[in-house]
Amino acid sequence: MSRRRSLLYAALATLGLSTVLVVAPAAPPAISSEQLAQTQEAHLAVIDEISMWDARSPHPRIGTVSGDPVAGTIEIGWAGPVPSEVRAIADDAATRGIDITFVAQEASEAELVELAHALAASMPADGAFAIGIGADSLSVEVPTPEAAEAAGTEPIALEGEVLEVIDETEQAAEQLGATVTVEETDTVPTTTAVTELAQGQPVDASAALFAGRSNDSAEVSGGMRVQTQFASGSWVGCTSGFTGFYGHQPVIVTAAHCSDFRDGRAVRNAAGTRIGTSDLVAELNDGARPYDLGTIALSYDTRTLPRIYTSETATVSITDTQLSFPPAGYQLCSSGQVTGWKCNMTTGAAYVACYGTECMNVQEVRASSGNAFCRGDSGGPVVSTPSSGGAIAVGVVSGLRGTNVTCSDRGLIAPMSQLMATIPGLQLHTVSGSVAGDAPIAILDRINAERRAAGVAPLSQDGCLSSMAQGWSATMAATSATGSAHNPNLNAQARGCAMLGWGENVGRTSGSAVAPNGIMDAWMASSAHRANLLSTSFTHVGIGVERGSNGYWYYVLDFGRR
């Protein structure tokens, strides 16, 4: 017996194998939540890079995109030959452990989305249904009459003109090399707003109002409870998405249906304090491709914070915005006034979902347990799984899919990529999660603390000035500038921001950690810098923080008056 065993070992060795191969392989090492978050961020960044290259081409050819952050793989559909520039991006990603495979498709996703919108526009206007967008395929999903009745929407009969429209779509799809399928389903797409809220009353009347996400007014964040007044006079409850700037105007990004797809609606917090007015809704939703996205225009003196609530008082920073349509297979988190903060969702297929009269290009997400969204979560922020630095803004809550129109484990989100592509002047308020962190917030807090101590009115952060300051701090860092190198284009840029007066503080600190208090101490100790910080001539400020390869941290304050 021992002789036969030794011969077996010898044979295995001759084949270049080891006897350990007969043992079941060990399970792959578990990935930590921080590793998963960082891997997803890296995947989303390379998908954004490829998508942006494709968007700039004369004929976009990217198809469906999916990934597996645990396995480190991305699969990208592509209609036609993959350009060398795109393959170069994939090759570079491979050096960082990201394996990208290109899969041949006949039709691009843009072509299929256009076809889906054309079909949706020809369907009955009062019925709710969804059109799934897959690899070279469209799936028309129509609720059964029973499901439609339970959801309070008009049923769609698969007969007559409806079938004729679908037949025409099948013919158009065939020319693209795609197919169309039709099925009846017991799920109904519906928005997630809550109506008829009394002033100062939360969705759950038994829950007390807390300080924080219910009462913010002078300082606002994503994930707040907000209410919008419809033409009927009733107040509709939603959740704020992300803070940002549109030129000088501080804004909150949320869902368009939260304002009944109308501009000029009054918006208040859940405590009943007016905070702003619905805006940019028509621009985002009155075209051929409506997006369930809009903004709340805030007072110019409102301070927006680059964060979202994860509880009544706890927050997570927003570090970036996803610029491409979210790929399938990635884990997301969201913050809603009803479901709260949860990280139980995975991205699925893209859809054109019709909530009755309005049809939106959205994406489905599925919860691994519990609910994805409930009514009242509409407009709330949806982000990538946060890393230690923060989270990437992915979209806002748009709707549900299910038999229960109150809550569902299947949700629909309106991607931020559509907002950024339609209104390029809108900029989300973010922090640099890997570099500056919350330093700009800390600097603004310190500035206003010093001004209050001196009996001077606080400064409001301005989006245009912030872009100026961040741009110059990045230039200083890239060129290893001295700490006294002022922006030579300051005057022209400040005029471009419509400022009536302006000034600038610059500086740098050494060390591995950013030092907001250190730079503020230095500025306060300098009479010229202190004069700018405490000047009654300024009403707004922009803050830039960047780290150079020489080890210095560079800081820029651009002051202005309107």
Image: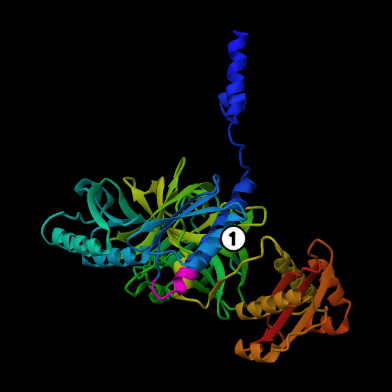
Nearest the eye: 171 or 25? 25
Q: Is residue 325 above or below residue 532?
A: above
Kind of residue at badge 1? Asp
Image-quadrant location for residue 288: bottom left
Residue 318, compared with residue 330, is above or below; it is below
Q: Quadrant of the C terminus?
A: bottom right
Give x and y (percent) for residue 178: 27, 58
Quadrant of residue 494 in the image? bottom right
Q: Which residues are magenta?
A: 53-59
User: Does the magenta segment cover residue 123?
Assistant: no
Regarding residue 279, the answer to whether it shows in the image is no
For the residue pair 464 and 99, the one nearer the viewer reads as 99
Which quarter of the figure is the N terminus placed in?
top right
Residue 493 pos. (x, y %): 65, 88
| Residue ID for mark 1 | 92
Position of residue 362 relative to residue 263, above or below, is above
**Residue found 59% across the figure and 66% down from its top:** 220
Q: Secondary structure at mark 1?
A: helix
Q: Position of residue 519 (x, y in %)?
A: 82, 71
Say whether residue 75 is visible: yes
Left/right of residue 55 with respect to residue 543 in the rendered view: left
Comparing 152 with 491, the one in front is 491
How packed is label 1: few (under 14 Cα within 10 Å), some, or many (20 or more)? some
